[in-house]
Image (spheres, helix red, strand yellow):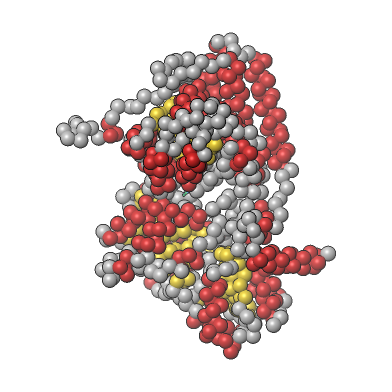
Amino acid sequence: MTTMSLAKALNAGLRRAMEDDDKVVIMGEDVGRLGGVFRITDGLQKDFGDDRVIDTPLAESGIVGTAVGLAMRGYRPVVEIQFDGFVYPAYDQIVCQVAKLHYRSRGRVRIPMVIRIPFGGGIGAVEHHSESPEAQFVHTPGLKVVACSNPADAYAMIQQAIHADDPVIFLEPKRLYHAAKADVDEAALSESPAPLWQSRVVRSGSDATLVAYGPTVSTCLDAATVAAEEGRSLEVIDLRTLSPLDLVPVHESVRRTGRLVVVHEAHVTLGLGAEIAARVTEECFHSLEAPVLRVGGFDTPYPPARIEEAFLPDLDRVLDAVDRTFGF
Amino acid sequence: MSDPVFGPAPERAPDPELVQLLTPEGERVHHPGFDVDFTPDELRGFYRDMTLVRRLDVEATALQRHGELGLWAQLLGQEAAQIGAGRALAPQDFVFPTYREHGVAWCRGVDPVRLLSLFRGVDQGSWDPAEHNFALYTIVIGAQTLHATGYAMGVQRDGLVGTGDPDRDMAVVAHFGDGASSQGDVNEAFVFAASYNAPVVFFCQNNQWAISEPFERQSRIPLYRRAHGFGFPGVRVDGNDVLATYAVMKAALQRAREGQGPILIEAYTYRMGAHTTTDDPTRYRLSEDLEHWKLKDPIARLEVYLRRNGMADEAFTADVAAEADALGERMRRECHALPDPSPHDLWDLVHAEKTAELAAQQAEYDAHAASFEEALS
Ligand SMILES: Cc1ncc(C[n+]2csc(CCOP(=O)(O)OP(=O)(O)O)c2C)c(N)n1
């Protein structure tokens, strides 16, 4: 059992994956000598060499495009995109090539690539450093998309994603990289981790359900703590996997609580919340006591740091939405 | 050993000639292709500009350390490249900067406090590009080089190239870094500019580093030589020599205004500071490297030249120092006083014509905020 931050857990998971399979290579801007701007790949180039931990030229389309070629040659590239807002130069390669090669080749070509993206806001950054682009990838058939929210999951999920034979967009809540450390039992997680494609109830409750992933899981857990003091019992579900979606625990929960609030930092319009609301309405229509509500970033560009608090879903906005589900 | 068919590998080609008019020791030298006669006032002006933007940079870095700015991208060491490039402009020329062109912003009359507001997180660029002929800072690496090229295509279509009227003919400048030279956008900008013979000057400050990655990761040949492959000329200038940078930029802008098309200038310089205030360069570069470049300091060499030739005395440098102190004091004061943005900016700034949907979101937010104020009062 080791106590570690989410950043350190990712680092440990990457190291483990590289030890287990020498086809795993890491690519990205500043990932080598510097260890990445967030130090997620710290020390890996020193230990595995610069053939396996590759500092690339400054070109995201180039990084993902060459990673496709490496994957076709039998490697398992783990690509780091420095910040969420810089994935777009690679968007064409991701949507038209990474996502479609398996389909186009009738399954003869596999792209076991992981694209790691630090995502979300709340770090006081300048433009393009705080975005939540997940829906754009969930909307792209051929990609799988996951988001971790805590150190133990980060450690296991990064290895599972690397092990998967399909391309995975791996979202890391950058605001939590160096937040509270937690115990990570590396031995246990290596032997029997929870399956990657499953969501999980992280706090049980009976009055209403909160669904979140990545950075908003901790916001929802805080909201549940506050609500409990006011006598309201909230169940919190960490989705973990965004594509495919695992809504079994959500349906099960909503059938008991009758109320659901989905919380993400991404813009509300056509965000994950929209899809979840539609599916839950289809599956649990007769159990619902109120419409499914969404709390998310407004339909505006991510604002300058001094007003990001107004943009981000916080405790108050989550609790306010919970209140509203009781008003119906 | 040279390949009999293809010739020597490019990296073995002889070192490129660097256009230089003032040596690191402060000695005035001449160049057959690029030379300008500078008046003592012009030379003193360069010294003043460089000293003030260095202070601007030091002050902003200190403000970040004190928590007043979220981030700052330092220009330390690149003053000559930026002042040379900025002062060579004609008023009608238009500039597309990266996020580090504080010296060029200075030359374009953008108040330093406006740069602070961006890095403080108050706004994302508060000057009017049309007022200063200076576009907003662009953080997405390389994107602005295409904008510059398109802008230049517009200038062409407006008939403002090659008329022979020095007050009308216009050139456009695209700033970018050595790291950016790897981006698709930058290479596409080269292709478009060449294809349409657009009046754009590509000005690359090769400061040797893209965060932690050394120049060799981006290119195995000197950057200015890439231009030839795209079909236009390239030149490497000593970017720590304000006279040479000015002279080369002046000639390139004139060439573009006359309708002779794009050109690439590689200003060879060095990022003396960290990439930004969140970066720690001791993790990836040697301090000897930095010491070596300190000897090439752009301001020190000009000061030596001015003093040795009786163009500057104690009184002059003391005046500039006092002006720098006053600038620093004003920046601190006005930075503290910058008002926080209104949450209404979120919705008000999205479209030219606000949609009903956004207006409804805004109203909902207002009601929510008001309910909290009520609860508090
Ligand atoms: C598309 C994109 N990818 C990555 C980044 C992150 N980033 C910011 S600056 C930088 C290095 C830029 O180096 P260079 O072009 O040499 O300019 P310099 O910062 O040295 O002035 C990187 C990788 C970015 N801003 N945009």
- Locate the C terminus of chain A and report the quarter of the image it occupies: bottom right
Query: Which residue is at the front of the view, B223 or A124?
Result: B223
Number of marks = 0
- In the shown orientation, is residue B130 left or right of residue B15? right
- Against A7, is A140 above or below? below
- In the shown orientation, is residue A286 left or right of residue B216? right
Query: Which residue is at the front of the view, B174 or A20?
Result: B174
Quadrant assignment, res B304: top right
- In the shown orientation, is residue B266 left or right of residue B170? left
Query: Which residue is at the front of the view, B108 or B299?
Result: B108
Q: In this view of the protein, can residue B89 be seen by the observer? A: yes
- Against B272, is A138 above or below? below
Residue located 47% across and 30% down the image: B162
Counting from the top left corner in percent of width and height, residue B349 is at 65, 55
Counting from the top left corner in percent of width and height, residue B215 is at 39, 38
Counting from the top left corner in percent of width and height, residue B232 is at 37, 34
Residue located 32% across and 70% down the image: A103
Residue located 16% across and 33% down the image: B4
Counting from the top left corner in percent of width and height, residue A240 is at 49, 70
Q: In this view of the protein, can residue B214 be seen by the observer? A: no
Residue located 40% across and 62% down the image: A95
